């Protein structure tokens, strides 16, 4: 399959071959969509962002050489950067973040409270993530949403594994402290 992938990429680079572009997109569309959806928890937004990611990929595929990383790794780097860009955007910051989690039929009052708590936690986590440096966001998002090992993240970002671990655990600690402060503020209200 990798040989097919290399041929598709070369055909796209050489003469903007639409059939090859479609095959490449078809191969990775579902997994990129799932990765984006895990972060957005919104079907329509995830579809839009996934489409934008593949547009970015096609516009920059001429820069892909395949010597430093696989195409899949390169594509996930584009997807991660695009998600980070979205969470930093004025659109995200200015919109009310209502309806991030699809409505679920809830059976009891406890479920309603749990759902609202989860939604608030999700929103707060996304806000906290958006405040981190781009490199730290990449580390946290790849660890949490892609379940990459520290070694894989280190290879992708071309930094020592010990640096990845340090930055990850420091970010998680900061986020926990901020979440705790947020929860204490909301309890007082």
Image: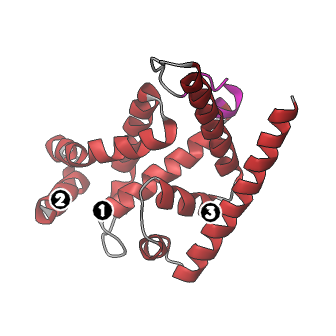
Magenta residue check for 93: yes
User: What is the spatial separation of the Cα atoms under label 1 and label 3, in whole angstroms?
Assistant: 22 Å
For the stretch drawn in magenta, the main secondary structure is loop
Quick one: SS at disc 1?
helix
First of labels 1, 3 by sequence position: 1
Q: Residue at coordinates 52% horizontally, 45% vertically from top-left?
A: 83
182 lies above or below 48: below
Of residues 186 and 58, the one nearer the viewer is 186
User: What is the spatial separation of the Cα atoms under label 2 and label 3, in whole angstroms?
Assistant: 30 Å
12 lies above or below 124: below
- Label 2–label 1 contact, CB within 8 A: yes
Horizontal arrangement in the rendering, residue 12 relative to residue 76 (left or right): left
Magenta region, residue range: 91-100
First of labels 2, 1 by sequence position: 2
Q: Residue at coordinates 22% horizontally, 57% vertically from top-left?
A: 9
Residue, disc 3: 136
Horizontal arrangement in the rendering, residue 45 relative to residue 126 (left or right): left
- Count the marks: 3
The quadrant of the picture occupied by the C terminus is: top right
141 lies above or below 58: below
Residue 47 image offset from top left, x and y in percent = 39, 31
User: What is the spatial separation of the Cα atoms under label 2 and label 1, in whole angstroms?
Assistant: 8 Å
Q: Which mark is residue 71?
A: 1
Residue 150 image offset from top left, x and y in percent = 48, 73
Q: Residue at coordinates 69% horizontally, 68% vertically from top-left?
A: 170
Work out whether residue 160 can be spotted. Answer: no
Residue, disc 2: 5
First of labels 2, 3 by sequence position: 2
Quick one: SS at disc 2?
helix
């Amino acid at each position: 399959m990798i040989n097919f992938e290399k041929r598709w990429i070369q055909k796209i680079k050489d003469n903007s071959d639409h059939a090859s572009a479609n095959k490449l997109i078809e191969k990775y569309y579902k997994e990129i969509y799932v990765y984006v959806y895990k972060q957005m928890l919104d079907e329509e937004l995830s579809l839009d962002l996934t489409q934008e990611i593949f547009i970015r990929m096609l516009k920059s595929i001429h820069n892909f050489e395949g010597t430093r990383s696989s195409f899949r790794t390169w594509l996930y780097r584009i997807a991660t950067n695009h998600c980070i860009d979205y969470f930093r955007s004025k659109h995200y910051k200015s919109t009310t973040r209502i309806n991030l989690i699809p409505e679920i039929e809830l059976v009891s009052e406890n479920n309603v409270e749990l759902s609202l708590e989860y939604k608030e936690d999700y929103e707060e986590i996304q806000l906290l993530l958006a405040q981190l440096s781009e490199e730290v966001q990449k580390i946290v998002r790849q660890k949490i949403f892609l379940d990459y090992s520290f070694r894989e993240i280190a290879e992708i970002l071309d930094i020592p594994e010990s640096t990845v671990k340090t930055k990850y655990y420091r970010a998680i600690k900061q986020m926990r402290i901020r979440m705790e402060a947020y929860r204490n503020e909301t309890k007082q209200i």
